[in-house]
Each structure stands twice: as C-alpha cells, then as structure tokens.
Image (cartoon, rainbow, N blue to C red):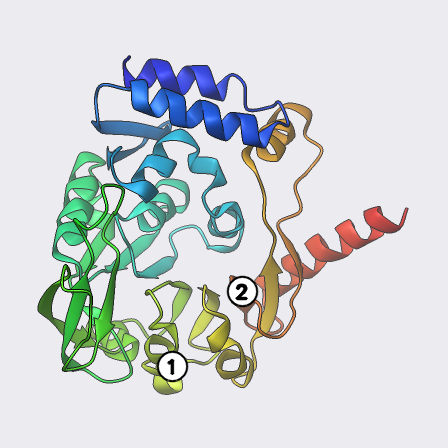
Amino acid sequence: MRSSTAKNIIRSLTTIQVRAGRSKLRKLLNRLTTDRQVVADLEPGLKLGLDLDKGLQNFFFWFPEEYEPALQWSIRNLLPLGGTFMDCGSNTGLFGLYAVHRRMARSYFIEPHPRLAQEIRANIERNEFGGHCVLHEVAASAQSGVMKLMMYEGQQRMSDGVHRLVKDDPQGSGGEKIVEVKVSTLKELMLQNGLEHLDFLKVDVEGHDVEAMQGLEDYLDPKRVTCIYVESAETFDLVRSRGYIPFQTRKIYIDELLRFQKQHNGVRYFEPAQSGSENILWVAPGSLQEQLLNHHVRAWQTLAQS
C-alpha cells in the first residue's frame, strides 16, 4: 500500500474519539505501507523528507498537528511576522521550517547530529527556504569548545537520531557511536548572527537543557529573548529567576484539533504553570505575548466555571 493511501485512510477516521483503536490502526497501516522514504506535505506549502522507519519521523507523517500542538500554536500566534526563531535541538528541522512557512521568520537551526543536520539542509532546499534559514552544526552548552556526542542510532529500528552530550569517558552499552562535536553557547550563536534580540527560542536537547540555557548568560533576559519554549523541568527555577512569566502546555490529541477545525469551538493549549512542570512557554512580562496568553487562560477558566 502506498503511504499516501494509508495516510488518507487513518486521517478520515481521526475525528472518532477512540484513540487506542486509532493507534492500532496506524500500526497496521504502517506495516502495510511499502514506500518508507517519503517527502510528505505536512500542510500546503511545507514539505519534510521522512523515514517511516524512524519513530519521530513516522509520527510526523501520520499526525503532524498532534506533535507539540501548543508549540505550533505559539509559533503561529506569538512569533511576529518576519521575526527571529532559534531552534536548539532541531532534529529534522520541523519547527524552524514551520516558522518560516507560517511567519516568514528568519530561522536558526542548532543541531550537532551529523545525519540530522544533513536532513535539515535537504529540507531547507526542498522548501526553497535558503534565504530565511541558517544551520549551525554544533551543540549548545554552558561553555564553548569540543565535547563527545553519543549517538544511539542503529540500536533500534525505530531510532531517529537519539543522542546526548557526554563527558570525556562515557559509559554505554557498547553499541553507541561516539563522535566529537563543536560546542557553542547560545549567546555566542546570537552574537555570531548579529542578534541583539531574539523573538522566540525553543530548547530541547536531550537532557542538556540546563547547560544550554546557562549558555545564554546575560542574554537570558526578557529584553533579549521574548519567548522561550523549553522541555526540561530542571530549567524552571533558572528561567523564573530572570523574570519570565511561565505558561504550561497541556496534552492535546488530533481528534480535538480536527473537531476545532470543523466546529470552530476552540482548543485550550495552555494553563497556569506549576513549579517543576515540563514543556513550559516563558514570555517577557508586559509583552503582547503575555497579554495574549493571559487572555487565552482566563477565557478557558471562565468557560470551565460557567
């Protein structure tokens, strides 16, 4: 079965609220799909090269709207038109490309994994976004230099570039591949690109988020970076200490998103943040972004009480 046919079948059923059944159907159709290397239209005008034997890329193919929908909403609504977007831990480049596609942004990709960096280059080229994109094949940390990158690729069929920075003498299971990679701080990368201000920073770097955020140094400041979307809960106290306002994302499924598209009855993406929460959107106090998010949260609180 062709991948396009299989995708049309499952997406025609996604408004049905039977998530367990949908997951089983996806697994069945995935096994029946014959073409494993595809160029998928994630939405009109945005293409991504995908390997359906890689876990995260497989998910992008079937349900792109369901992959971090709150982050997608934030890019659409909080990133200024023509603004600056930096993706630290870019994987295949989905969010940086999305920022260009939706907001005509200037996107900066930070990705040390050699194969993933090459996939980002290919995706930039196939979308003809070269004039809007800059790729840095480096890792982000608290200090610049050289570190070892442990890559788990190949240990699992569904692995899609899982990797992490390690110390000088890493202890692994023996099946990992280790390469040396260049390391820069996020402040250095901003200065290198002439960025005195950044509209939106996304950080997801496989357990190295704290060190990456520390590398902003005095640029971890609401006057320098307006919005920060970070996965790790361990960064909470650090970012809050710099004066940012936190908003917590909530889990959203594809059926809720598609019902919104058909019925126009809204989706709640954020709620008040709790200390230690993961996937936090931080915004500059007093900014238009904070005002919009406060309105979003209050509207849903009012609806819940009515």
> In this view of the protein, which residue sits in the foreground, 38 or 227?
38
**Label 1, label 2: how many angstroms apart (C-alpha)?**
19 Å
Q: Residue at x 36, y 60 (%)?
A: 84
Q: Residue at x 17, y 68 (%)?
A: 149
Q: Which one is in front in this view, the residue at disc 1 or the one at disc 2?
A: 2
Q: Secondary structure at mark 1?
A: helix
Q: Which residue is mark 1?
A: 219
Q: Secondary structure at mark 2?
A: strand
Could you say where residue 263 lies in the image, as x and y percent from the top left?
68, 25
Is residue 181 found left or right of 297 in the rendered image?
left
**Residue lying furthest left:** 179
In the image, what residue type sits under mark 1? Tyr
- From this view, report whether residue 197 is shown above or below residue 142: above
Could you say where residue 114 lies in the image, as x and y percent from the top left?
12, 56
In the image, what residue type sits under mark 2? Ile
Q: Quadrant location of the N terminus? A: top left
- From this view, report whether residue 189 is shown above or below residue 159: below
Is residue 117 found left or right of 255 in the rendered image?
left
Q: Residue at x 62, y 75 (%)?
A: 275
**Residue lying furthest front:** 173
Is residue 190 found left or right of 99 in the rendered image?
left
- From this view, report whether residue 239 is shown above or below residue 277: below
Q: Which residue is mark 2?
A: 280
Q: Count neighbours of disc 2 (C-alpha within 10 A) and say few if under 14, some if 14 to 19, many if 20 or more.
A: many
Instruction: Work out whether mark 1 precedes mark 2 in sequence or the reverse, and give the earlier one.
Output: 1
